Image (cartoon, rainbow, N blue to C red):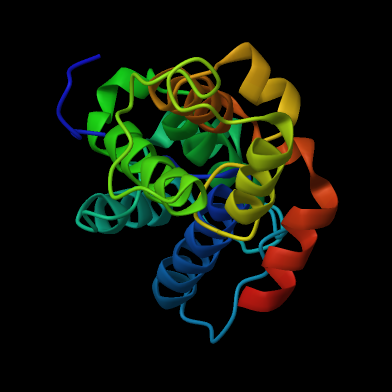
Amino acid sequence: MGNSYDVLTTDPGASLATLAECEQRFAGVLADIVGTDHVSVDSHFFDDLGADSMLMARFCARVRKQADLPSVSMPDVYKNPTVRKLAAALTNDALTADPRDDPATLAKCEQRFAEVLADIVGTDHVSVDSHFFDDLGADSMLMARFCARVRKQADLPSVSMPDVYKNPTIRKLAAALTNDALTADPRDDPATLAKCEQRFA
């Protein structure tokens, strides 16, 4: 890792929102192509919607023009023939990418962790390489407050005391937790996923 704040990763909640948004956008593009007002995320492209390969090729081409959507190919369509399956497969590919591919995310996480900790220990700045206990003189009660405050930030990964003891610097903590968040499969938490789908419906 470099010393500069090149690096926030998506926490699982944010990842799920992205998946739900992807489903919604895919459904919108497909509805326009098949000429209907609404497409269910569980409708089979061929069996339920009556689409053919030419129509789905148009869908793929239109999605590829959207820079903020994952690229879709015909093999993807045949392998995942509903909006729900297609979005899950393609956003999962993006989430399991090597976290080093997005250093801006990790640097931002380091920066935010450092800001929260600096406020708690009562200093203007905390180095990302300062040891929580040896260098900053923090104790378990203070670090418990840090964990609690971080958990209130929806765009930061959740931190527990075992995480703190295992990774006792901002740099190590951010690296460990952003890696966990990026490699988490959004389908691991169907209740949260269902809530996201409901909110986007």
Q: Residue drawn at (40%, 68%), measured in percent from left and top? A: 29
Report whether residue 46 is seen.
Answer: no
Q: Residue at x 34, y 19 (%)?
A: 129
Q: In the picture provided, is 200 more to the left or to the right than 63?
A: right
Q: Which percent across, then down, holds residue 30?
A: 46, 66
Going 67% across and 76% down the picture, which residue do you hit? Answer: 199
Out of 163 and 190, give the one closest to the viewer.
163
Extreme residue toward the right, this view: 191
Q: Residue 118's x, y, as percent?
A: 40, 46
Q: Is residue 117 above or below residue 31?
A: above
Q: Is residue 63 above or below residue 110?
A: below
In the rendered image, the vertical position of residue 39 relative to residue 65, given as above or below: below
Whether residue 123 is visible to the viewer of this picture, yes or no, is yes
Q: Quadrant of residue 138?
A: top right
Q: Point out residue 152 in the picture as x, y percentages from the top left corner.
A: 63, 60
Q: Is residue 172 left or right of residue 40?
A: left
Quadrant of the snapshot with the C terminus: bottom right
